[in-house]
Amino acid sequence: MNDVKKGEKMPVSYERDIRPLFRQIDIDQMNKHNVFLDNYTYMADPSNDHGNAQNVEDSVTNQSMPPGGPYWRDEQLILYRSGEATDICLNP
């Protein structure tokens, strides 16, 4: 049964909403740097005030990721931040 009432938005989910923001080439490139964009446990790690997720946000915001672009649109940044704000570790 769906717990979302009519007119309400579903909580942001890592698998459904956040993970698709990353292309396979982004994932492969960042894996080389021990940044695991496609790993929910890594991205939702609460250590250092969710430092992994924050570092990724910083990288896409300052356009150092993905290398050479295409850079994220405002809508993508807003979605990512909404996932972080609602604590993606509650919504795999």
Image (cartoon, rainbow, N blue to C red):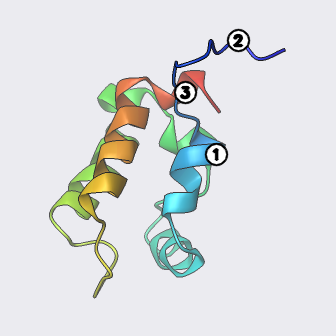
Towards the viewer: 90 or 11: 11
Residue 15 higher or lower than 26, as above or below:
above
| Residue at the image position 43 percent from the left and 35 percent from the top | 83
Asked if one can make out residue 50 in the rendered structure from this viewpoint, the answer is yes
Residue 52 higher or lower than 89, as above or below:
below
- Callout 1: SS: helix
Q: Give the quarter of the figure containing the C terminus.
A: top right
Three-letter code for the amino acid on which mark 2 is drawn: Asp
Q: Which residue is identified by label 3?
A: 89
- Give the Cα separation between the discs numbered 2 and 1: 17 Å
10 Å neighbourhood of mark 3: few (<14), some, or many (≥20)? some
Q: Give the quarter of the figure containing the N terminus.
A: top right
Looking at marks 2 and 1 on the same chain, the residue that comes earlier in the sequence is marked by 2
10 Å neighbourhood of mark 1: few (<14), some, or many (≥20)? few
Mark 2 or mark 3: which is in front?
2
Q: Hey, which quadrant is residue 84 in on the image? A: top left
Q: Which residue is identified by label 2?
A: 3
Q: Position of residue 21 (x, y in %)?
A: 49, 60
